Image: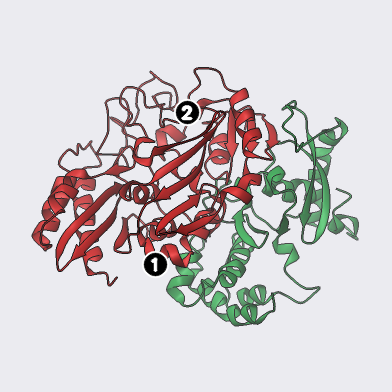
Chain colours: A red, B green
């Protein structure tokens, strides 16, 4: 690991000042000289691998006293960005009113990592693409722009089939982000000039020609919270993976439904493990809305969700698997007693 | 290494005190260079300088002079001489380095030592009461819950937390909530049995 200076933030303004001060005008967030430290489960790991090379680390954990609240207020939910995954997963109100959130967190990582990792850091976690994580591979457009992509013709079993480009096919690895995007969450961002908010769906950037730009955040900005309007008791997170526990998704689905007398009044479908960013399947939602639910409808929605999928040599199975995950998750959501 | 009671009290050389002494020699130049401090204000500091830190480990304070890159795991093993916590993968994937920080299990290999200042750190060495093994330690012995033993300190620390969190109600739940601790010898059935054996005694403790 390369040397860095360690600074402990005492409040939000000192944290964003320290992060912004170290940044150059054109810095990409992930390449910025100063990086915020929350749980450290991504940052410290990637610093050891020499993938991330900050010269300053700003410990923002002291902000947890104000940024870690879980608040259900008037039917709306606010989650502080420094709330830990395990605490949100174990919250009984979240389990009751937003099972898709509780399950997406509970089915991710291990309890040790969930105890450490913050929600803000979780949505910003970096891809698990083995060529990105191993600096002995020279070709990674995400790590060094313009260098090429070793995964395109390499071992790409775990790579994405949606949202890919000729420059990058790295999978977005998280689970919680699928729940957020399905529920139309808003993120609250704290920066030097105050607080702004943004639909969570706009946070992540597809790789396109610039895979090194992963989000719309700029150096000196921190995610401070998430808000979700309304409640979604009929919601599920279904995750298919190589192991039953402690493994990233090969394909996952976050589903939230409003169903009355077998009629789908509203439907939210998001996909994980198969796309380069948190992925909302609007085509599937459009098919479901206003229809009587049956297995045929579930299958058609699943087909629609993957209509634009494009496989590489080793990951075509994800398209078949992903459709089955969507269909099964829809059945599970409809069958829930809420 | 003067703050390592195991080293101070050693009546003769065994493998562990010998390794601890060697580690102490290796880190001595860091201390000699003088130290900055992990400041609470955000003044920039020279990243090449070691800093002073105080860790609270197993109820006692340890004053250290460390490089900011030092993980909690390396601070415990190389600077304090507590080698019970093991380094398996060093990337948060195996759980061998699991310790409790303010009562919560974490992987110490991805925790910066400086970020753990001011928190209560409990390692495998702090679990027994005198010569009486902790119920989870005794259960691992009784159930033969290991072969090579390398993952065992992490398994035991994780298992103690698993029970206290209320995640040891049945075999499936124990397997799910112990999945962050990998056992290369595959002693998993016996580990599940050990967690089940120790759970009632741990849950009946006050606090």
The residue at the point 51 percent across, 63 percent down is B185
Q: How many marks?
A: 2
Q: Is residue A54 above or below residue A283?
A: above
Question: Sequence-wise, which precedes: disc 2 or disc 1?
Answer: 1
Label 1 lies in what chain?
A: A
Of A261 and A168, nearer the camera is: A261
Residue A239's x, y, as percent? 32, 56
Is residue B113 left or right of B10 when viewed as pictured? left
Residue B48 occupies which quadrant of the picture?
top right
Residue A324's x, y, as percent? 20, 56
Q: Are marks 2 and 1 on the same chain?
A: yes
Residue A128's x, y, as percent? 41, 40
Dot 2 surroundings within 10 Å: few (below 14), some, or many (20 or more)?
few
User: Is residue A124 at all visible to an observer of this figure?
Assistant: no
User: Is residue A271 at all visible to an observer of this figure?
Assistant: yes
Dot 1 surroundings within 10 Å: few (below 14), some, or many (20 or more)?
some
Q: Is residue B59 above or below residue B77?
A: below
Residue A299's x, y, as percent? 12, 55
Residue A213 occupies which quadrant of the picture?
top left
Label 2 lies in what chain?
A: A
Seen as rendered, the residue at the extreme left is A296
Which element is circle 2 on? loop
Q: Which residue is mark 1?
A: A96
Q: Which residue is mark 2?
A: A136
Q: Nearer the viewer, mark 2 or mark 1?
A: 1
Of B147 and A17, nearer the camera is: A17
The residue at the point 82 percent across, 58 percent down is B60
Please give the label number shown on residue A233: none
Is residue B84 left or right of A197 when viewed as pictured? right
Which element is circle 1 on? helix
Is residue A25 left or right of A102 when viewed as pictured? right
């Amino acid at each position: 690991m390369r040397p860095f200076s360690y600074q402990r933030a005492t409040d939000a303004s000192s944290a964003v000042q320290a992060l912004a001060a170290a940044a150059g005008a054109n810095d990409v967030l992930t390449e910025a000289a100063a990086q915020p430290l929350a749980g450290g489960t991504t940052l410290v790991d990637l610093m050891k691998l020499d993938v991330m090379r900050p010269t300053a680390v700003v410990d923002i954990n002291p902000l947890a006293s104000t940024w870690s609240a879980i608040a259900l207020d008037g039917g709306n939910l606010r989650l502080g960005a420094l709330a830990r995954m395990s605490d949100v997963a174990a919250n009984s109100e979240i389990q009751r009113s937003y099972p898709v959130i509780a399950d997406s967190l509970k089915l991710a990582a291990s309890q040790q990592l969930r105890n450490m990792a913050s929600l803000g850091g979780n949505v910003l976690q970096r891809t698990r693409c083995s060529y990105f994580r191993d600096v002995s591979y020279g070709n990674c457009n995400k790590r060094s722009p313009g260098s090429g992509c070793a995964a395109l013709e390499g071992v790409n079993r775990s790579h994405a089939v949606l949202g890919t480009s000729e420059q990058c096919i790295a999978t977005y690895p998280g689970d919680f982000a699928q729940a957020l995007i399905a529920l139309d969450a808003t993120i609250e961002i704290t920066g030097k000039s105050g607080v702004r908010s943004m639909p969570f769906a706009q946070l992540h950037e597809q790789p396109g020609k610039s895979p090194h730009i992963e989000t719309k955040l700029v150096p000196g900005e921190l995610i401070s919270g998430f808000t979700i309007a309304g409640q979604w008791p009929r919601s599920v997170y279904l995750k298919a993976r190589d192991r039953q526990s402690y493994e990233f998704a090969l394909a996952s689905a976050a589903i939230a439904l409003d169903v009355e007398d077998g009629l789908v009044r509203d439907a939210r479908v998001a996909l994980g493990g198969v796309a380069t960013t948190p992925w909302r399947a609007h085509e599937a939602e459009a098919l479901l809305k206003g229809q009587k639910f049956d297995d045929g409808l579930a299958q058609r929605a699943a087909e629609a969700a993957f209509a634009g999928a494009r496989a590489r040599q080793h990951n075509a199975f994800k398209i078949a698997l992903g459709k089955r995950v969507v269909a099964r998750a829809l059945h599970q959501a409809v069958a829930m007693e809420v | 290494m003067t703050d390592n009671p195991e080293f101070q009290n050693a009546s003769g050389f065994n493998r562990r005190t010998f390794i601890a002494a060697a580690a102490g020699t290796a880190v001595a130049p860091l201390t000699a260079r003088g130290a900055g401090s992990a400041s609470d204000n955000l003044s920039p500091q020279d990243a090449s300088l070691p800093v002073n830190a105080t860790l609270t480990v197993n109820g006692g304070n340890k004053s250290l002079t460390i490089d900011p890159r030092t993980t909690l795991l390396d601070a415990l093993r190389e600077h304090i001489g507590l080698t019970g916590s093991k380094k398996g993968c060093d990337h948060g994937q195996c759980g061998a380095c699991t310790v409790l920080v303010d009562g919560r299990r974490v992987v110490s290999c991805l925790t910066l030592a400086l970020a753990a200042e001011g928190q209560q750190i409990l390692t495998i060495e702090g679990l027994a009461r005198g010569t009486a093994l902790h119920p989870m330690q005794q259960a691992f012995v009784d159930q033969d819950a290991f072969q090579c033993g390398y993952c065992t300190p992490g398994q035991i620390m994780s298992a103690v937390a698993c029970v206290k969190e209320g995640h040891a109600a049945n075999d499936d739940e124990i397997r799910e909530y112990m999945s962050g601790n990998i056992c290369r010898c595959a002693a998993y059935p016996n580990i599940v049995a050990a967690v089940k054996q120790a759970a009632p005694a741990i849950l009946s403790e006050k606090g």
